[in-house]
Image (cartoon, rainbow, N blue to C red):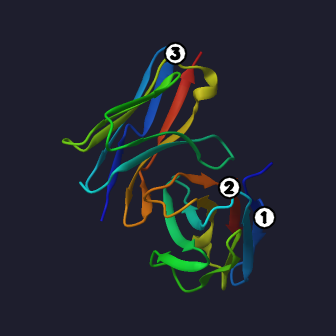
Amino acid sequence: GENVEQHPSTLSVQEGDSAVIKCTYSDSASNYFPWYKQELGKGPQLIIDIRSNVGEKKDQRIAVTLNKTAKHFSLHITETQPEDSAVYFCAANGDDKIIFGKGTRLHILP
Amino acid sequence: DTAVSQTPKYLVTQMGNDKSIKCEQNLGHDTMYWYKQDSKKFLKIMFSYNNKELIINETVPNRFSPKSPDKAHLNLHINSLELGDSAVYFCASSQGLAGTYKQFFGPGTRLTVL
């Protein structure tokens, strides 16, 4: 079945700088890759997703890139702000379910 | 308006007790899920239901029994609670099966077993 690896587990960036979180997946049949943000005490919230027919998708300060050949996908957050501090999860589909990475705790430093 | 809601938000109970968590979605979705998030924040699917039919059962102990009375509700009953059941349980829903459709999560139920 699908396996999703996510790095780093913790990331600290200065406010205003960019943050990049990387994931790899194992199942070449996966074709849907969502990213979730989880704030303290809340449920995961979908922030952006990408399907395998495109290589990049952007929504304001957030972008996701997908390399199907290498089975890599990444989340890029530019001009980071304090409210970006949260745990971020990448995920990939497989067997009618979503398999999540282990999460990246992002700290935005003042 | 809350899209996916769960009750209760917190649940503290003794080992050996039986408890239930309720979930409701008002998105008109066909598919609902239960996830368990452990202390390390790892999110793991437990069950999924599509149109009230069980689709996924991820080798969860049979002390856990989901019930879907209709498409908008998916409840989770847990018998003989154990210390290791302490976690945050999330309900989620999607328009169709998760491989294709976006999933929306509820706020979570933090279960503490003493």
Q: Residues within 10 Å of mark 2 (few under 14, many from 20)?
A: many
Residue A80 percent location from the top left of the image: 53, 19
Q: Amino acid at mark 3?
A: Glu
The chain identifier of the residue carrying mark 2 reads B
Residue B59 in the figure: left or right of residue B94? left
Q: Residues within 10 Å of mark 3 (few under 14, many from 20)?
A: few
Q: Name the residue that disc number 2 marks.
A: B106
Q: Residue at x 70, y 66 (%)?
A: B112
For the N terminus of chain A, the image quarter is bottom left
Q: Secondary structure at mark 2?
A: loop
Residue A64 percent location from the top left of the image: 40, 32
Closer to the camera in the image, A82 or B17: A82
Q: Which mark is residue B7?
A: 1
The chain identifier of the residue carrying mark 1 reads B
Q: Amino acid at mark 2?
A: Gly
The chain identifier of the residue carrying mark 3 reads A
Q: Is residue A1 above or below residue B68?
A: above
Q: Residue at x 45, y 79 (%)?
A: B59
Residue A84 in the figure: left or right of residue B17? left
Q: Name the residue that disc number 3 marks.
A: A79
Q: Which mark is residue A71?
A: none
Closer to the camera in the image, A40 or B82: A40
Q: Secondary structure at mark 1?
A: strand
Q: Amino acid at mark 1?
A: Thr
Closer to the camera in the image, B10 or A62: A62
For the C terminus of chain A, the image quarter is top right
Discs 3, 2: same chain = no
Q: Is residue A101 above or below residue A7?
A: below
Q: Is residue B23 above or below residue A106?
A: below
Task: Say whether disc 2 or disc 1 marks the residue closer to the N-terminus.
Answer: 1
Q: Could you give the CA–CA distance between mark 3 and mark 2, rounded to whole angstroms?
A: 29 Å
Q: Residues within 10 Å of mark 1 (few under 14, many from 20)?
A: some
